[in-house]
Image (tube, coloured by chain):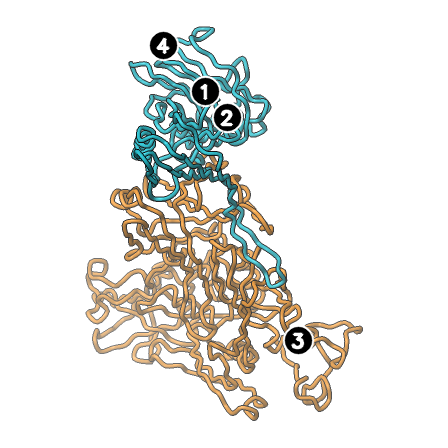
């Protein structure tokens, strides 16, 4: 299925609602389509809003869509009474004509439950959420219960059975006594890689009956309610290999813990991100009730990527600033009087970042702290600080790398450019990179953070970070590249320059201080 | 010379329907469903020797048909479409009644006749149809109503384009194209109370919510000026004069989807 918009065409929106035992086909006009289905013209689709979370806060803004079905005759209300609609899948297609080959799947979501349906005498309103709503769970999924562990120590009854990711060889994590008659302890709700050392009240003790598949061990003596047992270990594995890379952890959470089908994941994007994150390692003991969305979002913020659902596939994209773009918008496809620029509307700016890392789950403290700062910016506008708590990354090298990236991104007042795109803008997705030649901008690369599709008008409100706001990572540059004075703004942002000892591409010009590496 | 004709009591709509073929999502029942875009689609395109067909059993009492109109089709200009009738479901050759081939028109194919039967069948052969199938959106058949006094010469015919346009800053337009439709505005002048009552009876039957077929010039342009539509406006207004003779205006908006 493909759809390439042209300036004048018979555009339609189709909605397929998959109820149990009944599939409903609706469109914005009565259509008999190439698939031999009649799409009843009851559909009024409003705006489809999609937005990434803030770069700094673990708040997920889901894709949402409100769909209205004309129902003067009560047919839809009868269907609501007859079938269960909540949590059922809805697919929205956009394209032209009667041939389904000329359509694309633009949104796939589920009907919000509870509270997804409302109606009056004329219309039924159906509120949709993207697939993450369906795939969201509370982790860990199991709890210590006496039904499963008859001799469970009292203080652990009802506690979640931890999920342990990564290498905890250097920091002991809690273990629960699940059989007080034989002093058997359980570390996690899954097989683990190894048990390095067991501690009782902070002192090493020998252990026996090590069972890595069950993540259990025993010790000789234990006083429930008095003693505290912890263990240095290596956590969850995939085919016997310890899972440590952030992308592998994300994949494991999604496919193993959330049960997402591997066919619903854009593995190419995961592989690309894995390459970009290089040797990053992450770890976490999930031992209190946590939303899988929040856990994933924290991982995304710490590692600098975004997670979206595109064409029904979970897709990850790096936040690394790049100058390349796919679609150029100019006066031919930017709606009149629609452009506006805001300086740092999210309040992202910071020139002093403090990173707390190496979480100790036994003592519930961060064991280490480091900083990254932009001293020049501090001298200019004063210190603006922000503290970032790392709950996944734990090595000093990784934390310094990400703090360095964040100080590059945040110690400049990011411009957010908004405009309404026409024509092919209806196909844009968050995370896309677009160019803008309009007003005082020339081929300005933007990283889209929000899109608002207006299907009735076939336009899309686009909001993107002005990528040239950022300092750039260095790129290898040819001998014939222009020097600082001759370079365009885009070239200054993207290419490498020889610098003086102060990092200035032009001696004495602090605005040319572009010597940074991602 | 004929006056304008209205067909608003569709006798095939309540008939039992059979067809040579249909696909699951677009069955033959759709041929008498109100929406033109809700099609009956065959699996083949028919030949003169083995045409596709759709037949209607109107009940044990034979019904008179004086007008047949087909809308929303995908037929090519080479298609051969005929109406047949018989007193039972035994289609001998030749049938009791068989029309000449209907004249092709992209918007409507229309036949006027005067026959009374219980079984009716439309046969279709369109071997050069590149779609590979035959699609009909709406079949209307019944007895037309022809007022004794015709409309005035003051006829307003409009072709409406409901497409939406958004303009870029440079003036370039981006359009959502929609199917164009016709509107006919006609007037009856100085018509008798009896004819007014006939118009009122028709308006009571269909109001502004039920479809009808309107043939503006059944003699000269039976296909080109026949539309499937609904009365537009919320009321049937009459301006009365001496002896209750009066004027009455009607607007019919074509329904193409």
Subunit of label 1: B
Camera-side mark, 1 or 3:
1
- The mark nearer the N terminus, 4 or 2, is 4
The numbered dot on residue A493 is 3
Chain shown cyan: that is B
Q: Which residue is mark 1?
A: B112
Q: Can residue A150 be seen from the camera position used here?
A: yes
Rendered residue at 56%/56% (across/down): A268
- Please, what secondary structure does the residue beneath circle 3 have? helix
Instruction: Mark 4 and mark 1 in contact? Answer it, CB < 8 Å.
Output: no
Residue B126's spot in the image, x, y percent?
A: 55, 22
Give the left or right position of residue A17, taking residue A148 as reference: right
Q: Which residue is mark 4?
A: B87
Label 4 to label 1: alpha-carbon separation: 20 Å
CA distance for labels 2 and 3: 70 Å
Q: Quadrant of residue A58?
A: bottom left
Which of labels 3 and 4 is toward the front? 4
> Same subunit under labels 1 and 3?
no
Q: Which chain is orange?
A: A
């Amino acid at each position: 299925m493909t759809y390439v918009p042209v300036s004048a065409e018979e555009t339609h929106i189709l909605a397929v609602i998959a109820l149990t035992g009944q599939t409903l086909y609706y469109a914005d006009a009565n259509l008999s389509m190439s698939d031999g289905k009649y799409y009843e013209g009851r559909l009024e689709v409003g705006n489809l809003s999609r937005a990434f979370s803030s770069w700094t806060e673990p708040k997920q803004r889901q894709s949402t869509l409100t769909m209205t079905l004309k129902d003067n005759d009560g047919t839809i209300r009868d269907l609501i009474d007859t079938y269960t609609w909540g949590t059922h899948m809805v697919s929205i297609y956009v394209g032209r004509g009667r041939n389904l080959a000329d359509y694309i799947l633009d949104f796939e979501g589920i009907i919000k439950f509870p509270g997804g349906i409302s109606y009056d005498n004329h219309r039924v309103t159906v509120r949709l959420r993207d697939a993450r709503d369906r795939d969201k769970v509370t982790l860990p999924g199991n709890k210590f219960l006496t039904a499963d562990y008859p001799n469970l120590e009292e203080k652990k009854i009802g506690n979640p059975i931890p999920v342990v990711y990564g290498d905890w060889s250097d920091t002991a994590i809690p273990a629960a006594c699940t059989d007080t008659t034989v002093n058997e302890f359980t570390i996690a709700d899954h097989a683990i890689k190894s048990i390095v050392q067991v501690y009782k009240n902070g002192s090493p003790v020998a252990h026996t009956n090590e069972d890595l598949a069950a993540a259990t061990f025993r010790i000789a003596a234990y006083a429930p309610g008095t003693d505290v047992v912890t263990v240095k270990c290596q956590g969850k594995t995939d085919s016997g290999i310890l899972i440590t890379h952030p992308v592998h952890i994300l994949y494991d959470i999604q496919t193993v813990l959330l049960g997402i089908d591997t066919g619903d994941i854009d593995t190419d994007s995961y592989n690309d991100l894995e390459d970009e994150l290089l040797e990053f390692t992450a770890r976490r003991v999930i031992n209190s009730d946590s939303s899988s969305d929040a856990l994933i979002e924290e991982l995304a913020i710490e590692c600098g990527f975004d997670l979206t659902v595109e064409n029904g596939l979970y897709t990850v994209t790096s936040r690394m600033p790049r100058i390349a773009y796919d679609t150029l918008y100019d006066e031919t496809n930017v709606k009149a009087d629609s452009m506006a620029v805001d300086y740092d509307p999210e309040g992202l700016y910071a020139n002093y970042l403090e990173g707390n890392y190496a979480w100790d789950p036994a003592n519930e403290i961060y064991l280490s702290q480091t900083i990254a700062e932009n001293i020049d910016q501090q001298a200019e506008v004063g210190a603006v600080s922000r503290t970032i708590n790392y709950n996944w990354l734990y090595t000093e090298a990784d934390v310094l790398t990400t703090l360095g990236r964040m100080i590059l991104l945040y110690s400049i007042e990011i411009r957010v450019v908004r405009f309404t795109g026409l024509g092919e803008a209806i196909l844009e997705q968050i995370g896309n990179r677009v160019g803008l030649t309009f007003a005082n901008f020339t081929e300005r690369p933007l990283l889209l953070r929000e899109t608002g599709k207006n299907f009735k008008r076939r336009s899309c409100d686009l909001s993107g970070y002005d990528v040239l706001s950022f300092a750039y990572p260095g790129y290898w540059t040819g001998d014939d590249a222009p020097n600082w004075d001759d370079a365009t703004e885009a070239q200054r942002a993207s290419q490498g320059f020889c610098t003086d000892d102060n990092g200035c591409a032009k001696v004495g010009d602090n605005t040319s201080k572009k010597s940074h590496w991602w | 010379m004929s006056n304008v004709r209205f067909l608003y009591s569709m006798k095939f709509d309540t008939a039992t329907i059979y067809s040579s073929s249909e696909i699951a999502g677009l069955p033959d029942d759709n041929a008498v469903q109100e929406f033109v875009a809700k099609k009956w689609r065959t699996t083949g395109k028919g030949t003169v020797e083995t045409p596709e067909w759709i037949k209607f059993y109107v009940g044990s009492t034979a019904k008179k048909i004086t007008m047949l109109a087909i809308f929303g089709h995908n037929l090519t200009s080479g298609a051969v479409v005929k109406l047949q009738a018989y007193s039972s479901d035994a289609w001998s050759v030749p049938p009791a009644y068989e029309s000449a081939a209907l004249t092709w028109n992209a918007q409507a194919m229309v036949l006027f006749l005067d026959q009374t039967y219980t079984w009716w069948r439309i046969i279709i052969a369109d071997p050069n149809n590149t779609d590979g199938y035959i699609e009909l959106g709406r079949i209307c058949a019944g007895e037309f109503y022809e007022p004794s006094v015709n409309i005035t010469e003051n006829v307003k015919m409009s072709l409406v384009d409901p497409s939406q346009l958004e303009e870029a800053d440079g003036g370039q337009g981006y359009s959502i194209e929609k199917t164009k439709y016709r509107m006919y505005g006609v007037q009856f002048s100085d018509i008798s109370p009896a004819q007014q009552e006939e118009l009122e009876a028709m308006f009571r039957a269909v109001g502004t919510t039920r479809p009808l077929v309107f043939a503006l010039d059944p003699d000269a342009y039976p296909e080109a000026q026949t539309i499937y539509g609904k009365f537009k406006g919320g009321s049937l207004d009459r301006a009365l004069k001496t002896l209750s003779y009066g004027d009455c205006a009607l607007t019919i908006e074509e329904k193409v989807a």
